[in-house]
Image (cartoon, helix red, strand yellow):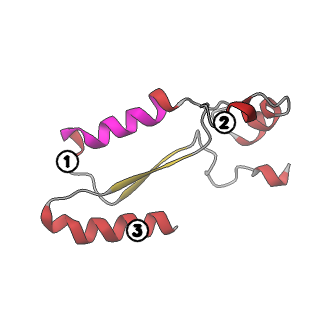
Amino acid sequence: MTLDMLTKMMALELGIDNIRVNSIAPGVFKSEITESLMQKKWLPNVTRRTVPLRTFGTTDPALISVVRYLIHDSSEYVSGNVFIVDAGTTLPGVPIFSSL
């Protein structure tokens, strides 16, 4: 919620100077930081139950593709948005880890 409001307020204030403001809200990705998590034996079962796309992506291409879009001229009319890149884990009705 805070990220969303901050992004929108900055987009409103900086838009007059033709500055676009967007943000990316990533979920869990396979990376060096999450390497030990990805090796847990229980993770595939939890993933099947809580991740609509049934997998965790990698930062490339999942996040990098969004960044490339946002810095490209094709997004010149896009501002004030939060791009959620999380394989669907924040969709309504998706169980959260603590409910398992």
User: Is label 2 or label 3 in front?
Assistant: 2
User: Which residue has dot 1 on it?
Assistant: 76
The label on residue 6 is: 3
Whether 12 is among the magenta residues is no
In space, the residues marked 2 and 3 are separated at their CA atoms by: 27 Å
Q: Position of residue 44 (x, y in %)?
A: 78, 29
Q: Total marks drawn?
A: 3
User: Is label 1 or label 2 in front?
Assistant: 2
In space, the residues marked 3 and 1 are separated at their CA atoms by: 20 Å
Q: Position of residue 16 (x, y in %)?
A: 15, 68
Q: Residue at x 35, y 67 (%)?
A: 8
**Label 3 near label 2: C-beta < 8 Å?**
no
Considering the numbered disc 3 on the image, is that residue within a helix, a strand or a loop? helix
In space, the residues marked 1 and 2 are separated at their CA atoms by: 33 Å
Task: Tell me the kind of residue under disc 2.
Answer: Thr
**Residue 68 image-quadrant placement:** top left
What is the magenta segment's predominant secondary structure? Answer: helix
Binning the other alpha carbons within 10 Å of mark 1 as few (below 14), some (14 to 19) or many (20 upward) gives few
Binning the other alpha carbons within 10 Å of mark 2 as few (below 14), some (14 to 19) or many (20 upward) gives few
- For the record, the magenta segment spans 61-73
Position of residue 19 in the picture relative to residue 65 (left or right):
left
**Residue 73 image-quadrant placement:** top left
* Among numbered discs 2 and 3, the one appearing first in the sequence: 3
Q: Residue at x 23, y 38 (%)?
A: 72
Task: Tell me the kind of residue under disc 1.
Answer: Glu
Please tell me whether residue 2 is drawn above or below residue 56 in the rendered image: below
User: Which residue has dot 2 on it?
Assistant: 34
Q: Position of residue 59 (x, y in %)?
A: 50, 32
Position of residue 56 in the picture relative to residue 73 (left or right):
right
* Among numbered discs 3 and 1, the one appearing first in the sequence: 3
